[in-house]
Image: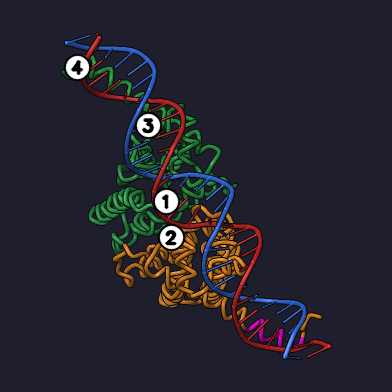
Chain colours: A orange, B green, C blue, D red
Amino acid sequence: MPSITRTTQAARAKRREEIRGRLLQAVEQCLESETYTDVSIERLVRQAGIARSTFYVYFEDKGDLLRALAEDVIVAIIESAGYWWALPPDATKDDLREAMERIADTYRTHRVVMSAVVEATAYDERIAEQFAVLLERTISEVAAHIADGQRRGFAHDDIDAQQTALWITWMTERGLFQLITPAGAVETERLMQALTDIVWSTLYARTRS
Amino acid sequence: MPSITRTTQAARAKRREEIRGRLLQAVEQCLESETYTDVSIERLVRQAGIARSTFYVYFEDKGDLLRALAEDVIVAIIESAGYWWALPPDATKDDLREAMERIADTYRTHRVVMSAVVEATAYDERIAEQFAVLLERTISEVAAHIADGQRRGFAHDDIDAQQTALWITWMTERGLFQLITPAGAVETERLMQALTDIVWSTLYARTRS
DNA sequence: GTCTCGTCCGGACACCATGTCCGGACGATG
DNA sequence: CATCGTCCGGACATGGTGTCCGGACGAGAC
């Protein structure tokens, strides 16, 4: 007879979550000192203190683990980006800058995972797909924001909402990645101001004067 | 006694170039049907019709081969981008669009190699370095163009030339990559028009009226 | 107290790609 | 015919991956 007490199941689930959490934590630690590509499952499980064979009980492969890690981060980014399109029609340039900086902060907070995701996106199809969802979601939100602004008169009506949304999203994503890259000895404040200026002059400038 | 006739040396060099060329050609062919990461040296040399051991006489590794391939392409891109900052002070928006489209054409022409380079940049340090040179070179050219325009009155003087150049370059690079990516069922014309609009309203718009 | 179940460990295995090395073949030169 | 440069083919060590299995162990079941 299988032992299916409620308490047993709960205990099992808890233990499962505990080990799963150890793995997620371990990969973040590994990513502090190594590139995602360079992280081997061997070192990963040693860091987590579990057997290599056990790893495959929890995740298909390294990519699966990263996808699990990325999910929460992507949600956080989408949420923080929401402050932009929630801006009121009469928002000032400073309001826009603050919204942009909020997104940048989220990127910085999750810098380790985001770097790995961008890296893996280059050659792991499934991660690329997941990342594409983030991009597409953002693009459609930006496009909707522009179209809404055009109807309500706070955005230029002679621009192509869809295509402009593409470029602005690509630009922002790429720039934020540069922001969290080790090589980037960038001056964050001036950088974010410049991004704000570009978006402002592209979308709103001529409707305020 | 070693045989070092002039004709011998010339013949040897020619043969060397011939094999080297076969390898460069083979990798381009492989990249038509496979990702850069998925290309194995085994298949590569089979495609080129040489022995695997011979490969290592010509290149250190796969990355070395790609770097060799990328060099020419990068030169071509820098050259085509030059048409932008060579635009006269009284250039129209259409002139700008044509300059942008020229860059896009170059990207498309070298789509196979550029895709591989962007992919490899994610995890191959030395290729990343090479790609960074392209970016930095472009950024400084754009920055110089903006600064020049500010002095001569054809560009907005209330923008940060350096930081704006960063964003515009990142945006363009990322967008052009999307343009050559298989997933991108993008409408090229509208897309390039939108890029032109963004750059125009950011840099020049208020100086012409 | 013993049985059984779920779970994890440790190790073995086959597999694959990489980079190095070497002996043999071959052609061109002196 | 000896020599040199070059390429081929194959062997080898290395290191990572994903799968599999026997054994251990704790916690309920009876």
How many angstroms separate mark 4 from mark 2 (CA)? Answer: 56 Å
Query: How many callouts does the rendering have?
Result: 4
- Cα–Cα gap, marks 3 and 2: 39 Å
Q: Are dots 1 and 2 in contact, CB under 8 Å?
A: yes
Residue stretch rendered in magenta on the structure: A5-14
- Chain for disc number 2: A
Quickly name the residue at label 1.
B173
Q: Position of residue A6 (x, y in %)?
A: 75, 88
Q: Are marks 4 and 2 in contact (CB under 8 Å)?
A: no
- Callout 2: few (<14), some (14-19), or many (20+) C-alpha neighbours within 10 Å? some
User: Dot 4: few (<14), some (14–19), or many (≥20) neighbours within 10 Å?
Assistant: few
Residue on which disc 3 sits? B54
| Amino acid at the residue labelled 3 | Thr
Q: Amino acid at mark 4?
A: Ser
Q: Provide the residue designation for mark 4.
A: B3
Q: Which residue is mark 2?
A: A174
| Classed neighbour count for the residue bearing mark 3: other residues with Cα under 10 Å, few (<14), some (14–19), many (≥20) | few
At 44% from the left and 30% from the top, the residue drawn is B25
Distance between the alpha carbons at the discs numbered 4 and 3 = 22 Å
